[in-house]
Amino acid sequence: MKSKKLIGDVKAVPFLLPFFVVYAWFTVYPMLKGLQMSLYQWTLIRQMDYIGFANYSAMFKDRQFWEALWNTTLFVLLSTPGMVVLALVLALFANMRTRFRTFLRSSFFLPSILSVSVISFLAIFMLQPYTGFVNSLLHLMGSKAEPFWLADRNLAWVSIIGVTLWWTVGFNMILYLASLQEIPDYLYEAGTIDGATDGQLFWNVTLPLLAPITRVILLLQIIASYKVFSQIWLITRGGPGTKTRPIIQYIYETGFKNNDLGYAATMSYALFVILLVLSFIQLKLRPKEEV
């Protein structure tokens, strides 16, 4: 029996080998190369001297690194709860048995297929002072204020979070919608026969059964939010000043504008460790029956 299993494993090797080679070349090798670069003074032109852990020591003393890391963490804290709650609300609407169900599903998911350059252009156009759609709407509603959405730190964060929610919440909505459709109808029927209200059915049937997908969405969302870069780069360039600059943008500027790939690789590994620890904590907190 064991020999048959061994023969089966050996036969699978030729089929797995091409994927393993590609994975090792494009994923494992760059990771190891990045670790090597973090130990050197390394520029875009050539490899310089070995400096050991000097880049790591400099990183802990770098105020700009801590500011960028805090900006990224703030983005995670502000966007993740909304990304989970809003996705659930939209999924509940999209799961309703109405004639508008197809329209609701399409309209909720449609922004997700737009490119980041398109949604960034739309955001800049709509948030312009004096002529932008948002300020014009506020004026029609009686407001006399003229907010500069991208020039004020707090308003810039509101703008970035709002645009990100509108752009990406559709993917999480689809995950919730698929899970909602997996809940058996007889659970709701049994609850209704027992006299449960719609609210009681939601809190005691729907939410507990959505807990596994909620944990998956939470993990994916935190990882994705810590890697935020493109929409902030295109909408505010990290401004005003560096008040919305995320860690990925600082890594990019350090590596390709300041010509210091070694230090950029060091900060990349710091971010890698943070994501690894957060993922590990979330996986350890999962109930045993889901493992």
Image (cartoon, grey):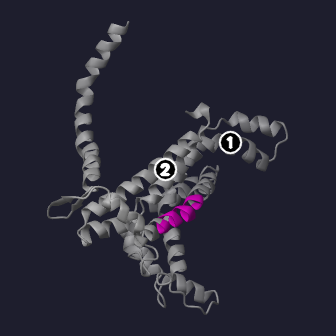
Residue 237 image-quadrant placement: bottom left
Rounded to the nearest whole Å, what is the CA distance between mark 1 and mark 2?
20 Å
Q: Which residue is mark 2?
A: 220
Q: Is residue 115 visible?
A: no
Residue found at the very far bottom of the displayed protein: 144
Q: Main secondary structure of the magenta part?
A: helix
Identify the disc placed on residue 208.
Answer: 1
From the top left corner, tell me how far across and down residue 174 is, in percent: 52, 50
Determine whether label 1 and label 2 are within 8 Å by CB.
no
**How far from the left and from the top, in percent, is residue 147?**
54, 87
Secondary structure type for disc 1: helix
Q: Which segment is the magenta one?
A: 70-82
Q: Is residue 249 above or below residue 108?
A: below
Q: Nearest the camera: 11 or 169?
A: 11
Please give left or right for residue 214 compared with residue 45 in the image. right
Residue 81 shown in magenta: yes
Disc 2 marks a residue whose amino acid type is: Leu
What residue type is disc 1 on?
Pro
Sequence-wise, which precedes: disc 1 or disc 2?
A: 1
